[in-house]
Amino acid sequence: MNLYLLNLIGKWIGVLFVSILSFFGHYEEKEVQVFNTHKNMSLDLTTEIISYQTEVKYNNEKPNGEKTVIVAGENGYLVKNNENGSYKIIKNPVNEVVEVGTYVKPVPAVTTSSGAGTVNSYIGKMTMYYNCPNRNYCRTSGGHDLKASVFYNDPTYGTVRVLSAATSKFPLGTIIEVTNTPRGTFYGIVLDTGGSMIAAMQRGEVHIDLAVDAAVEKAYTYYNVGYNVKRYGY
């Protein structure tokens, strides 16, 4: 056997030996690296305050204007993702509850005389009615257009509020000084009437309605209101 043939056989044996060792894992150890294909991400997040609201409850047994906090308000907050606009509420707000007194000390009913005749005073309830916000017109029993104004220009007493009352007791045109209300003292003229006022008078009670503008005023109920008749109507 010549030298060339022996050399060739030796190479094949070497290749076979390396292949066998590699197959059984004894030939070479290789370091395996695992690469993170996800880059670090920084989210655009902000925290926003959710302000609490205040709920007002009225109590006719407490002095007028006296305030008591029943439930303390607490703000909530949320986390907002500024990239897509989504958000998550972390804490809901707690609304504040405040109780406000509306009791006004009654004025004793009196009857006095003046040069212009007898002036009567009464104590009763006052409610308020809106000037027909869903209608284009709203006229009182006396023909006054409440949509135009809830005020009336009287030749003697000037600008006064429009009132609704039992006309059997307070005829249309009656001028009444209204006292002891959270709105202060003001003058009104009876230009309207209503079933609840008539029913109250039949029970011997005084109930008067004050016309209010739905766009700018809220309607409330007041008790122990003083009504001083300054002029009886027509």
Image (tube, rainbow, N blue to C red):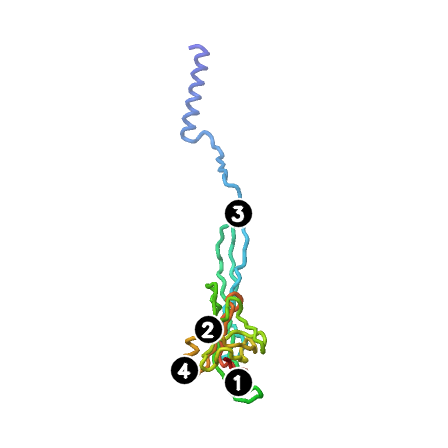
Q: Nearer the viewer, mark 3 or mark 1?
A: 1
Estimate the spatial distance between the alpha carbons at disc 4 and disc 1, rounded to whole Å: 22 Å
Q: Which residue is mark 3?
A: 83
Q: Which residue is mark 2?
A: 141
Q: Residue at x 49, y 83 (%)?
A: 123
Q: Nearer the viewer, mark 2 or mark 4?
A: 2
- Quarter of the image containing the N terminus? top left
- What is the three-letter code of the residue carrying label 1? Val
Q: Which residue is mark 4?
A: 202
Q: Residue at x 49, y 53 (%)?
A: 87
- 26 or 166, nearer to the observer: 166
Q: Is residue 2 something one can see in this rendering?
A: yes
Under circle 3, the secondary element is loop
Q: Nearer the viewer, mark 4 or mark 1?
A: 4
Counting residues from the start of the chain, the first of labels 3 and 1 encountered is 3
Task: From the top left corner, tell me how far across and down residue 68 is, in percent.
Answer: 52, 74
Count the numbered circles shown: 4
